[in-house]
Amino acid sequence: MDVLKLIDEIEDILENGSSLPFSNKVMVDVDEIYDILGEIRVKLPDEVKQAAWIKEERQRILAEAQKDADTLLSEAELRLQELIDEDEITQKAKELAEEMITKAQNNAKDIRLGALEYADNILLETQEKLKEHIDTLNENRQELRGGQ
């Protein structure tokens, strides 16, 4: 991630800055820090856009899973009707159709749950990374202000 690299640059600047005797303060090039912070401000919206894309992708996956489930149910119903039309195997047809419907419903449920869990995990990771970035930025800003 570009933002992480920029934060690493700030850390390097702070680590390599001239330290003031008898304190934990460091002299740094303020313009250089401001330039990097400016780049972070530019690039951070990209990460927010990525989180929005993940949310949209989650919706797409759920819609696709529902469509697949509907297709499976529709196919099962068609198959059931065909089997009912054949007198000799009507009973077997009902059993098979019910089994197919149950499997389709279970499959659709599993797909929905998996998609929700996947999207939630990605959103959680993105949220945690963004929080880390914000926390680091706040800490760096505090240090730049001299711990006010």
Image (spheres, grey):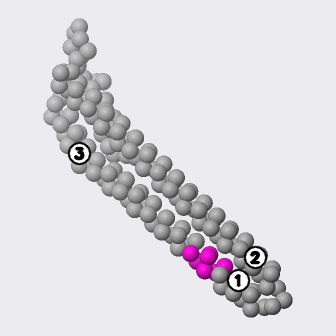
- Residue type, label 2: Leu
Per the image, the residue denoted by label 2 is: 96
* Quadrant housing the C terminus: top left
Q: Residues within 10 Å of mark 1 (few under 14, many from 20)?
A: many
Per the image, the residue denoted by label 1 is: 80
Q: Nearer the viewer, mark 1 or mark 3?
A: 1
- Residue type, label 3: Arg
Per the image, the residue denoted by label 3 is: 41
Q: What residue span does the magenta drawing correspond to?
A: 70-76
Q: Is residue 3 left or right of residue 104?
A: left
Give residue 131's position: percent from left, percent from top. Answer: 35, 39
Q: Is residue 12 magenta?
A: no
Give residue 70's position: percent from left, percent from top. Answer: 56, 75
Which of the two discs, 1 and 2, labels the residue nearer the N terminus?
1
The kind of secondary structure element at disc 2 is helix
Q: Residues within 10 Å of mark 3 (few under 14, many from 20)?
A: few
Q: Main secondary structure of the magenta part?
A: helix
Marks 3/2: CA–CA distance = 59 Å
Is 89 located above or below residue 56 in the figure?
Answer: below
Q: Residues within 10 Å of mark 2 (few under 14, many from 20)?
A: some
Q: Is residue 48 left or right of residue 146?
A: right
- Residue type, label 1: Leu
Q: Quadrant of residue 2?
A: top left
Is 129 located above or below residue 114 in the figure?
Answer: above
Q: Do the CB atoms of the residues marked 1 and 2 lie less than 8 Å apart? A: yes
Give me the residue at 54% from left, 68% from top.
65
Residues 129 and 36: in front is: 129
Give residue 124's position: percent from left, percent from top. Answer: 43, 46
Give residue 10's position: percent from left, percent from top. Answer: 28, 33
